[in-house]
Image: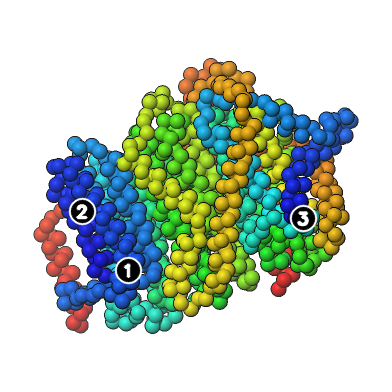
Amino acid sequence: MNYFFAALGLVLTGGVAALIFHRQFLFAKGFSLLLTVAGCALGLASLALPSDGPAADWSLTWLQIFPLSCSVDSLSAFFLVPIFLICPLAAVYNIGYQDDAGASLKTMVGVFFLNLLLVAMALVVVAGNLLTLLLAWEVMSLSSFFLVLYDFKKETTRKAAYLYLVFSQAGVLLISAAFAIIFGSTGSFLFAGAATLPADIKLLVFFLACAGFGSKAGVFPLHIWLPHAHPAAPSHISAVLSGVMIKMGIYGIVRTYLLLGSQDPLIGQAVLVLGMASGVLGVLYALGKHDIKRLLAYHSVENIGIIMIGLGLGMLGATLGNPVMAGFGFAGGLLHVFNHSIFKSLLFMGAGAVVKATGLLHVDDLGGLIKQMPVTGRSFIAGSVSISGLPPGNGFISEFLIYFAAFHGLSETGANLILVMLAIISLAVIGGLAAACFTKVVGIVFLGEPRHEELRSVGEAGSWMSLPMLLLASFCLVIGVFPEPFINAVFRTVAQMVPALTVDHVLVATVGTNLAWASRLLLLMVLLIMAVRKAFSLRKEVARGPTWGCGFTRPTVRMQYSGTSYALSIVSFYRPFARIRTIWSGIDTIFPKQAAYASRVDDIAEIALHRFLVSPVAFVLGKLRWIQHGHIQLYIGYIIGTIAVLLLIFFL
Amino acid sequence: MESILSFGVALLVAPLFPGIILKVKAFFAGKKGPPLLIKYYTLVKLLRKGFVYSTSTSLVFRMGPIVVCATALMALLFFPFGGVAPLLFFQGDVIVLFYVMGLGRFFMVIAALDTASPFEGMGAAREAFFGTLAEASIFTMLILFYRMNGSLSLAGYFTGPEAISQTAPAGALLLLVIVALFMVLLAENSRVPVDDPATHLELTMIHEVMILDHSGPDLALIEYGSFCKLLFYASFVAMLIYPFHQFGPVLAMALFYGAVALVYVAIGITESIMARLKMNLVPKYILTSFTLAFFAVILSMGISQ
């Protein structure tokens, strides 16, 4: 693993160098970018080297009692690819995004923590035992906490970062509990010990770990921190957090599942149900939100849901002995991890470009930006098509694999059949709602007329920002049109991950080829129709005029349909799950002067958490407030008293 | 060869059938009605015209009609008209096709939003909303079809000895599906009672309001695309109504297009005797279709176990 560690060393050096040279803004930026990109390239290359693979495990004992070890298997390698691919692109984007030399130190602190986060995420996925995983996980959580806190002068940012800290520490507590059970019954930090646990303990460990890792991944109802933290962080950070970091939660769930090797159908069923809930509710709340970055954060919840549906189908299929369902489920889920990291970081970068150019985040303030920002607009549309799961984007490929798994699960019986049916229907609903949501974002933000005059004079994002967006948009299309190598690669990962599973290679190859040809056929059709249109438009006059106002002669830009009105009828259809609050001043005179209308959609998980957990706990703790009085002598007294009581208990 | 021929015939006759709907409606209204070939004349007229573009629009507005038409044509490529094997098919093609048509809807909607017209935005929002519900209904039917013959492709559904038909085992369930699919057909193709293609008030339109600003060949592409989409759904219903595969290709084709014509007559009758629903009732209408399909699936669990 020498090359791998060398890669991480380069990245970390890049981060430290940024801090050291922060007075020379341009040099520090350039130098750290160079090291980061070189490190990530080396990291990607090291994955391809056979000598760097599982044969070269690495271990050492730290402070006598802490054994640390790292090893790369196929699952780790799979999750390393998005880490080493997306993070350097975010770093490149950041060159153009944070170009204020006056805030040099702050920017460089951001660069440092981003590189630290990169290293920590890489260590999480290569961790070879429980302790290493926990340590790397904690470094990852803390470095990402500081990244969320980047704009610390804003109160909303501080609140968001605090919320994130609470969730990540509660999550790590649950993970530690799960690992402590494994350690307690085997007496070692080795991963291998997990497989020897009794069956019911395995279930307990899985659900504890699932809750802990799920809170990082943003699984409903533990997703509450995401829509606060992502908008608070700068956009390139959001791209990494949403594109890469939350996938570490998925990695944790898959790793725990594989280590336990439990054959209980309850695990697959639970993951499937969590996936459906996250998917449908995530996209629903996304529709109800009109802050671009908050909306994208909810789409992360949705996509985590899709990934979990895939993995849940895989786990269920493995338990039920249905190889097609298992193989395609795991493969679809994993491929969606990769695909989501691409289009979600692309969309966050697009949102960042909009924010940088306009300073506005609410969709109803924007409009018509594709004319001023053609590159951003077009790549954002490519990302939108992909995230909506529509061909020829890459999102369709992974969703198709999951559908394929689900349809092959229809031969099961009883509760499993019902769950599989619900999975198919929820995937269809998620797909439709995601398309509705992204037509909203694209249509309201980039198309139509600008809703403010200032928007007419904004400029395109600089080339440092456009380049990563263009690259990511082309990845989306390339994976969509040439899916075979990616499908084959992900099935190879699945085969090594679950060796008991035998997936029909001919079937996999056929599915890949068919999908490839379907995408190409679609593009061909579009080209053909374009040619037909061209033929009919030769020597035709092209007139330009205003949009027809349906008889109304004085339309203004403020009359355009807004994002709120676009989404309201859909959201209100799902009302029990999305609480809509409207504030409407009403019109009570014959010649009304001013009226105000506002509506917001609330997340039921947030309401329930507040009502059933935070409020009761705050009430009880409020009663104990007298313990905290600020007298240091008494605090020392508490400590002595506690130790005395503990000693008494211990010795009696 | 047969496949190419059947695809070509479908492309040719797609604009013919909407004329039947107009004839039926005229019959109910006691009028003579436009000629049967009216839609061909309209297409030719539109193709000869020039373009008018709104100053608000961008490239997306021009891409809209192209994608809409391309996706509708792609759906026809995979359809086994009259049980004749289609040009292309593979396991899973239905999922691809409904997603491809979803792409058509995506571009239709963003092209409408590109015009900055509040009416077009309204139509776009409705199209997006009703589309999500219709998709759930369609995928429920696909679940049933998979349980009936283990296939995931249109060719698998309607060709070969295992074809889905009312004479096959569990054929009675198709009655529910035919009604459900016909309801989805009306919703997805903007017919009464979901949308009224003949209405004159933009506020109440869905599909027609989204294409207000398209002109000339662009409008022709959209119109032709929607004829193809309607033919796709009508053929789907027709294939469920009657099993054609035991006849020779020529007779099967004749019978098939007869059944398709019947579906269009049914659309015409529905449009003549029903008023359109209020907008807030449309979700309930589509959910009725979903419920029927879901009920059929539940029944299938009893039959196959």
Which chain's residue wears label 3? B
Circle 1 or circle 2, nearest the eye: 1
Q: What kind of element bears circle 1? A: loop
> SS class of the residue under badge 3?
helix
Quick one: label 1, few (<14), some, or many (20+) residues within 10 Å? few
**Left or right of B283 in this view: A240:** left
Tag 2 secondary structure? helix
Mark 2: few, some, or many residues within 10 Å (few <14, many ≥20)? many
Callout 2 amino acid: Gly
Residue labelled with disc 2: A14
Question: CA separation, marks 1 and 3?
Answer: 52 Å
Q: Residue at x 38, y 52 (%)?
A: A242
Label 1 and label 3 in one chain = no
Q: Position of residue A192 (x, y in %)?
A: 35, 79
Quarter assignment of residue A636: bottom left
Q: Amino acid at mark 1?
A: Leu
Q: Which residue is mark 1?
A: A49
Q: Same subunit under labels 1 and 2?
A: yes
Name the residue furthest left: A633
Q: Which residue is mark 3?
A: B2
